Amino acid sequence: MNIVLTGMMGTGKSIVGKKLARKLNMSYVDTDEVIEKEAGCSINEIFAGDGEKKFRIIEKKAVKYVSLLNNYVISTGGGVVKYAENMDELEKNAVIICLTADPDTIYKRTKKYINRPLLKVDDPEKEIEKLLKQREKFYSRCDLMIDTSNKKVNEITGDIVKYIGSIKKA
Ligand code: S3P
């Protein structure tokens, strides 16, 4: 079985995912890294060159690929949830956990990085609010939601380990 971490940019998927994998003795993979390897360039370059549409096509391939793995913690890009076929693939062999945070926290966590093409807009705070609202409905397909706004990485991994333990017992 795999554990998928999804949710908006800046909610802590990568840092939590790496820590969780170490804690549970699982391997770790990030769909954005699979995409960059496949495309031979950065996410920024894909968006700038071929646009978001092309990025989503490569992303779907990456999701298919990681869904076939086993005993992995998989961090996905924040937009993966928007496409039912991505969720269908991931659900086959994974518990899907959605990390969330309030818009202000997401803004503070993402503003220092330039690797988020969707937030390269005049008003990134407004864009974060818009994306969160647009994506809200897709998060209902996830098995568990964790608000990471005021939580330390250790607490979040602890919550996930507890949850995984509870479903194994059931
Ligand atoms: C995206 C999130 C990014 C990356 C791409 C698009 C999104 O990943 O896949 O920039 O649509 O939310 P992170 O969520 O890891 O930042």
Image: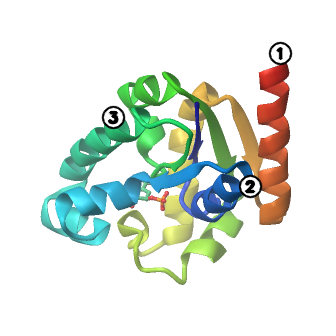
Q: Tell me the quadrant of ligand 1.
A: bottom left
Numbered label attached to residue 23:
2
- Position of the C terminus, as image quadrant, is top right
Mark 1 falls on what kind of element?
loop
Rendered view: 130 above or below 160? below
Residue located at (85% from left, 39% from top)? 162
Answer yes or no: do the residues labelled 2 and 3 have beta carbons within 8 Å?
no
In the displayed structure, does residue 131 sit left or right of residue 146?
A: left
Q: What separation in Å lies between label 3 and label 1 (alpha carbons)?
A: 28 Å
**Horizontal arrangement in the rendering, residue 82 relative to residue 62 (left or right):** right
User: SS for tag 2?
Assistant: helix
Percent position (x, y) of residue 7?
A: 58, 48
Cα–Cα gap, marks 1 and 2? 22 Å
Question: Pointer 1: what residue?
Answer: 170
Hey, what amino acid is under mark 1? Ala
Q: Which residue is mark 3?
A: 64
Residue 166 x %, y %: 85, 27
